[in-house]
């Protein structure tokens, strides 16, 4: 492992501390090194507050060392005025002569401009150290800005014989630990979606009551607005988006109705609307038809499939993943959890 890789791994480690509060901004870590010694560290703690570079520079006690130091940062320093001033300008003003960047920032107001500004100021800039790892760190942010849609995660539980439930009946397949892991995953996404049949059959809350974190925005598809307003989805406790073809629907009790054209492809329309709303990540939990629609459209990035020990012998067949690569298989108290990535 090179020194560049060693210090970049520390940047990634620091960046992860911002997982809960940095979004919708990316998680970023920064490390300042002088003569082989770390003299400053920082990460982006909360959206709207100082970026990683700002916090790392502020942590340096011997500021005279900055003029012969290297700052490592997992994501390209910003070059624009947002909620905070440009980090590239700060690095230049402090006289730091060398910058090592993990990966470029796809956000249109940065996207190479930070690196250019640093180089134009005579700073030695190295780009692409542990690039894949740094991109993976902010995969939701990267997908949102490069593909102009939310990062999509699919999730379902299926029986040992490949069914996700019995039509018209609420069918419990997940065990307690798997349900807790699911709620943790919900807390890591900005929005969560189910189809009309799942909403009607299961009456899900789609919250994070088994975990600590912010409840995601609830999303449901209800073409004719036939779902009863007594469902948990419409209780007003969490904002809910309903995709429908009914034009006359107006917002009420925390519920927003969004009209889309059901005679055309609906997945791109829904993702486009969520992107316009600034939603960077979407967790799709069911049902089978909705999940398969995302799979068939190639509009998914990750999938978590829990396979239980129960055999149903009949029911609604589980979705079939195409163009997926199995990344990990784990045992969850006797159930199998398969993690796949789109390829």
Image (spheres, rainbow, N blue to C red):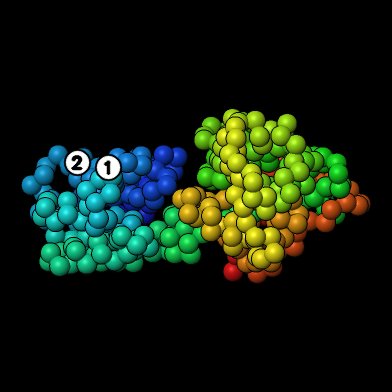
Q: Quadrant of residue 341?
A: bottom right
- Camera-nearest residue between 126 and 211: 211
Number of dots carrying numbers: 2
The C terminus is located in which quarter?
Answer: bottom right
Work out whether residue 133 can be spotted: no
> Circle 2 — which element?
helix
Q: Earlier in the sequence, mark 1 or mark 2?
A: 1
Residue at x-position 18% and y-position 63%: 118
The N terminus is located in which quarter?
Answer: bottom left
Q: Quadrant of residue 237?
A: top right
Q: CA distance from mark 1 to mark 2?
A: 10 Å
Residue at x-position 75% and y-position 41%: 227
- Camera-nearest residue between 1 and 89: 89
Classify mark 1: residues with Cα within 10 Å, few (<14), some (14-19) or many (20+): some
Q: Which mark is residue 85?
A: none
**Mark whose residue sits in front, 1 or 2:** 1
Residue at x-position 25% and y-position 45%: 84
The residue under label 1 is 50
- The image shows residue 299, relative to residue 331, as above or below, that is below
- Camera-nearest residue between 320 and 260: 260
x%, y% of residue 241? 60, 44
As drawn, which residue projects farthest toward the left?
64
x%, y% of residue 149? 51, 59
Are circles 1 and 2 on residues that touch, CB within 8 Å?
yes
The residue under label 2 is 58
- The image shows residue 136, relative to residue 205, as above or below, that is below
Q: Quadrant of residue 112?
A: bottom left
Question: Viewed as shown, does residue 286 lie left or right of 114?
Answer: right
Question: Viewed as shown, does residue 308 lie left or right of 295?
Answer: right
């Amino acid at each position: 492992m090179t020194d560049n890789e060693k210090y970049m791994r520390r940047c990634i480690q620091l960046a992860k501390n911002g997982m809960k509060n940095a979004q919708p901004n990316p998680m970023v870590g920064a490390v300042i090194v002088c003569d082989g010694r770390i003299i400053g560290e920082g990460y982006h703690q909360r959206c709207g507050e100082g970026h990683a570079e700002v916090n790392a520079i502020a942590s340096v006690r011997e500021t005279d060392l900055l003029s012969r130091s290297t700052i490592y940062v997992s994501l390209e320093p910003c070059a624009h005025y947002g909620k905070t001033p440009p980090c590239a300008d700060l690095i230049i003003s402090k006289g730091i002569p060398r910058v090592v960047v993990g990966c470029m920032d796809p956000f249109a107001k940065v996207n190479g401009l930070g690196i250019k500004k640093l180089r134009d100021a005579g700073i030695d800039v190295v780009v692409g150290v542990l690039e894949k790892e740094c991109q993976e760190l902010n995969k939701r942010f990267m997908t949102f800005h490069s593909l102009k849609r939310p990062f999509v995660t699919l999730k379902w539980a299926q029986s040992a014989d490949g069914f996700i439930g019995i039509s018209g009946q609420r069918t419990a397949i997940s065990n307690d630990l798997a349900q807790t892991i699911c709620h943790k995953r919900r807390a890591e996404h900005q929005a969560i979606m189910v189809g009309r049949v799942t909403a009607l059959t299961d009456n899900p809350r789609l919250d994070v009551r088994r975990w600590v974190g912010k409840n995601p925005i609830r999303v449901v598809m209800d073409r004719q607005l036939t779902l009863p307003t007594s469902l948990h989805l419409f209780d007003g406790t969490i904002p809910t988006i309903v995709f429908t073809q009914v034009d006359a629907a107006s917002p009420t009790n925390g519920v927003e109705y969004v009209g889309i054209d059901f005679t055309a492809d609906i997945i791109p329309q829904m993702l486009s609307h969520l992107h316009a709303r600034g939603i960077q990540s979407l967790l799709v939990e069911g049902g089978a038809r909705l999940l398969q629609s995302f799979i068939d459209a190639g509009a998914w990035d990750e999938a978590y499939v829990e396979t239980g020990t129960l055999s149903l012998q009949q029911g609604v067949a589980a979705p079939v993943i195409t163009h997926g690569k199995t990344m990990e298989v784990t045992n969850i108290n006797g159930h199998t959890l398969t993690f796949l990535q789109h390829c």
